[in-house]
Image (cartoon, grey):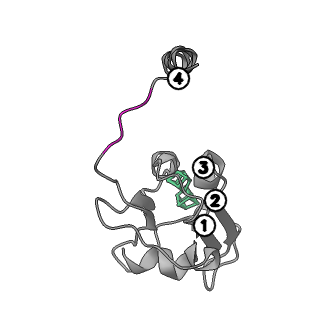
Amino acid sequence: MRGLRRVLGRLATRRRPLAPVSRTSRGAPRLIRREDGESRCVACVLCAGACPSRCIVVEAGPPPGGDGIDQRARVPRRFELDLGRCLLCGLCEAACPEAAISLSGPTLLPSAPNAEDMQLDLDALLATA
Ligand code: SF4
Ligand code: SF4
């Protein structure tokens, strides 16, 4: 019986070889500010579309004082990222045409006692920028 388990174990490992686990982390996603202090994000939603765990929600709105007709002038009215579901894969960073979202580098990742506290809003995502 033990021999059969060993053979089945080897077959399973051959089909799905174990990937090496990195000791370093690229950190968690954060939003980046422009030089004037405002978010670089133009609410194009490409990051949300690229995210495999669907943990980004972006709603666009006109900038303060703007009419929203110029698409390039849009800003995120709502930007939320559920860090509890984030895979730290960096696909959002790769998809962003404005370099507005970036993984924070090899820092300690935030943790929270409940799932709601892992839901980061615009201010929280800009806080470390
Ligand atoms: S790092 Fe990956 S999983 Fe996390 S928000 Fe970005 S695309 Fe989604
Ligand atoms: S972070 Fe980048 S990809 Fe995501 S909505 Fe903003 S500008 Fe678009």
> Is the residue under label 4 in contact with that under label 1 (CB below 8 Å)?
no
Q: Which of the labelled discs sits on residue 51, or is there none?
A: 3
Q: Which residue is mark 2?
A: 55
> Is the residue under label 3 in contact with that under label 1 (CB below 8 Å)?
no
Q: Which residue is mark 1?
A: 82
Residue at (71% x, 67% y) in the render? 69
Residue 30 % position (x, y): 44, 67
| Three-letter residue code for mark 1 | Asp
Rounded to the nearest angstrom, the CA distance separating label 1 from label 4 is 29 Å
Q: Which residue is mark 4?
A: 16
Rounded to the nearest angstrom, the CA distance separating label 4 from label 2 is 27 Å
- The residue at label 2 has a CB less than 8 Å from ligand 1: yes
- Residue 28 to residue 92: above or below: below
Q: Residue furthest front?
A: 1
> Is the residue under label 1 in contact with that under label 2 (CB below 8 Å)?
yes
Q: Quadrant of the C terminus?
A: bottom left
Asked whether residue 97 appears in the rendered view, the answer is yes
> Is the residue under label 2 in contact with that under label 3 (CB below 8 Å)?
yes
Rounded to the nearest angstrom, the CA distance separating label 3 from label 2 is 7 Å
Residue 6 % position (x, y): 50, 19
Identify the mark nearer the N-term, 4 or 3. Answer: 4
User: Element under label 3?
Assistant: loop
Ligand 2: quadrant of the figure:
bottom right
Residue at (60% x, 66% y) in the render? 82
User: Element under label 1?
Assistant: strand
Q: Which of the labelled discs sits on residue 11, or is there none?
A: none
Rounded to the nearest angstrom, the CA distance separating label 1 from label 3 is 11 Å
Residue at (45% x, 68% y) in the render? 31
